[in-house]
Image (tube, coloured by chain):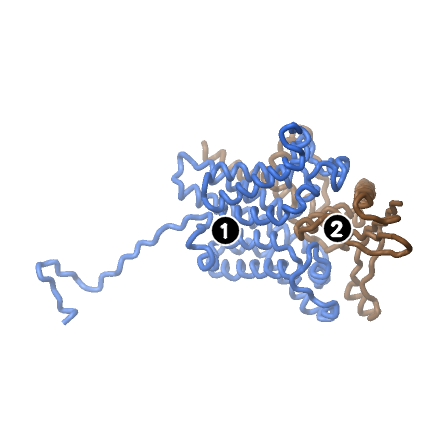
Chain colours: A brown, B blue
Amino acid sequence: MLRLIFVLGCAIHFSMASAYNLCIIFKLPDRLPELFRYVARYQDLAGLSGGYTFYGPSVGMQVQLEYIQYQGGNETFLGEPRIQSTTGMLRLNSYFQSGSSFLDSNQSYLQDQVRASISNLTAGLSDIVAADSIACRLIAKHLPASVEQDKDPLHSSRYIILFEYIKN
Amino acid sequence: MLRGLGLLLSLDMWRLWPDLSMLFGQGIFLDQHSISWQQRPGTLSIHTLIAHLPEYTLASLEWIHFFGLLYIICGLALFFDHYYSAAMLGLIILHYLFFVANYTWSYGADYLVQTGLFFGVIFCCFKGSRLPNDKWATLGATIFRLQLTVVYFFAGLGKAIGPTWWNGEAVWKAIQQPLAPALFTIPQSAQQFTAIWAGLGIATLLFELGYPLLWINRRIRIYISTGIILMHLCIALTMGLIHFSSLMIWYNLCAWDHPLLHCIAKPMIKPLETTEPTLQVRTATADLDTREGGNNKHIK
């Protein structure tokens, strides 16, 4: 009996992991009925809710934050001065990377979230950095595909400004 | 396997320590509203937990450092094999609170860590009363191998459905825009070697989609697991994902009992699977004469 429960548990675990990833890969709706809300809790606990399609099917444009400090007619470009560790920066970049997935899909609510986060971060920075005004830009680096490079050898990578927020 | 995982988690939390209050503090970096967007409904995260803890005992920033320190202690206790079950339970709860219940500051490695800890709790804390410990550990190793197979297979399938991993464009983009500072930078002029990038992209797909072949026999297992380990080594060097790569290399070494594991960690860390001891009895080549004095013809 115990063996049967164990085998059944394993079958449910792997079916759940497979179904979740298939939904991500083939963009199927993954809304669970209210009855199965405990399934979502189990997925979180077992670490299945992240999905395994790392950089699949393609690698998107990487986004990053850039601050511009305007003071006495000079402008200075800054990175994120409040995060010191590389693992902290990795987590911050990952936050903006997942937030900017509205570039590839039509999730407009993500756009509002990223916009609000940027204004929030800029307001926080103006409290600790002396400046007449501070601008925060969310920029995406566009790397030319090899096809574009073949057509135009001068075609190099360029930055695209997705959002700009200025705090006076 | 879990001892190594404990060490990796302690190191990662130690590296995150300078930014702990900034990232997890109440409205210090991002406001509560932005943080709450990534909160899983009906769950308790470190953000919601600290908001409910009494301020008169410890300030909220001190609570964050307290939980961070507890995380490091649990990881080290796991590594040094002290209070094993308590450390394991503490670590899975704290990891869930920090990185899973609210995924604002999470990335792929955090979910894979949660899976490793989940299997650890199931197969090490709840040891079967009906099965002997070695059989229970072997079962745990088999299920963990199956989990890794699912991880790699879907990672490969997700990549294979698009054209960019087949023509090398995805590999090039991934190494040119790392999430963390890379240890080894590849110059932009190297884009002209399209055959190399296409080869690396196809190799990645083949290793990931071919991961189920590890189950066939020991010889194939060595080649594919070594390929996967090298792939993670390249990810660490060119994309700066050191924690993620170390974690996956460790998982693969332990799950498949790779020979490299015996070189680097055998004296102190056992893999998840307990290997059966081999009986070393020399094959008799001649009849032994057990009479007093013996038959010593062979040394004459």
Residue B195 image point, x, y percent = 69, 69
Q: Secondary structure at mark 2?
A: loop
The residue that mark 1 highlights is B255
Residues A83 and B189: in front is A83
Residues A162 and B144: in front is A162
Residue A70 visible from this viewpoint? yes
In this view, the residue farthest toward the left is B292
Residue A73 image point, x, y percent = 91, 55
Number of residues whose C-alpha sits closer than 10 Å to that of mark 2, classed few (under 14), some (14–19) or many (20 or more): few
Q: Residue at x 73, y 58 (%)?
A: B177
Residue A41 image point, x, y percent = 63, 34
Distance of mark 1 from mark 2, alpha carbons?
41 Å
Q: Is residue B277 above or below residue B297?
A: above
Residue B237 image point, x, y percent = 63, 61
Residue B164 visible from this viewpoint? no
Q: Residue at x 40, y 41 (%)?
A: B133
Q: Are marks 1 and 2 in contact (CB under 8 Å)?
A: no
In this view, the residue farthest toward the right is A73
The answer for which chain carries disc 2 is A
Q: Secondary structure at mark 1?
A: helix
The answer for which chain carries disc 1 is B
Q: Is residue A16 above or below residue B283?
A: above
User: Type of residue at label 1?
Assistant: Ala
Q: Residue at x 60, y 52 (%)?
A: B243
Image quadrant for the C terminus of chain B?
A: bottom left
User: Type of residue at label 2?
Assistant: Pro
Q: Residue at x 77, y 55 (%)?
A: A61
Number of residues whose C-alpha sits closer than 10 Å to that of mark 1, classed few (under 14), some (14–19) or many (20 or more): many
The residue that mark 2 highlights is A81
